[in-house]
Image (tube, rainbow, N blue to C red):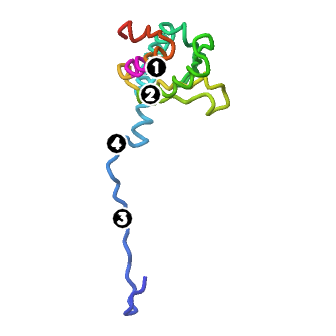
Amino acid sequence: MSNLNGRTDTAISSMIFARSRHPPADLVLTRRDDILGERRRQLKENLACVEEWIAAERDVVEWVRPDAGALCCVRLRPSAFDDIAVSRFYADLGREGVRVAPGDWFGEDRRVYRLGFGPFATPDLRVALGRLSMCCGGCTGSVRWAQAGF
């Protein structure tokens, strides 16, 4: 690199690695079984929690139980939710701060939604499912999960 005096200066660049909250890849790969084992345990526990919730709310929802992954598809039963109740359900979710992916985002009926259960600690998932029940109950008068004290 030349400066105005015709001298050539050498630029030295160094990389400073910021400390990250994520471990380096080589550490992750060497501990793969430990890390994935813990993740599998958490997903299994959370799936069981969602199964309990579906069973408690079976009069108002039905689902496709996932074979793998961290989300499932849930459908508001047409016998419990008319079109007005479906709209009210999503409005209530917004007020409660509960986020699901409505079916019309992925080409399905609005009665269908995707429910993610992977990234939560199980106690937090139970709270979220309780809020989801309150929203279902606000539309149908049925709040079994929340009443059961889950």
Image spot of residue 47 (x, y percent): 48, 16
Distance from the alpha carbon under mark 2 to that under mark 1: 9 Å
Mark 3 touches mark 1? (CB < 8 Å): no
**Residue 21: mark:** 4
Q: Residues within 10 Å of mark 3 (few under 14, many from 20)?
A: few
Distance from the alpha carbon under mark 4 to that under mark 1: 36 Å
SS class, disc 1:
helix
Q: Which residue is mark 2?
A: 98
Q: Is residue 95 left or right of residue 16?
A: right
Query: Tag 2 or tag 4, which sits nearer the N-term?
Result: 4
Bounds of the magenta span?
A: 125-132
Distance from the alpha carbon under mark 3 to that under mark 1: 54 Å
Instruction: Please state, as top left, top right, bottom left or bottom right, where the N terminus lies in the image.
Output: bottom left
Image spot of residue 64 (x, y percent): 60, 16
Q: Residues within 10 Å of mark 1 (few under 14, many from 20)?
A: many
Query: Tag 2 or tag 3, which sits nearer the N-term?
Result: 3
Query: Tag 1 or tag 3, which sits nearer the N-term?
Result: 3
Of badges 3 and 2, nearer the viewer stands: 2
Mark 2 touches mark 1? (CB < 8 Å): yes
Q: Is residue 110 left or right of residue 47?
A: right
Residue lying furthest bottom in this view?
5
Q: Which residue is mark 3?
A: 14
Magenta stretch secondary structure, dominant: helix
Q: Amino acid at mark 2?
A: Val
Mark 4 touches mark 2? (CB < 8 Å): no
Q: Amino acid at mark 1?
A: Cys
Instruction: Please state, as top left, top right, bottom left or bottom right, where the C terminus lies in the image.
Output: top left
Q: Is residue 18 left or right of residue 55?
A: left
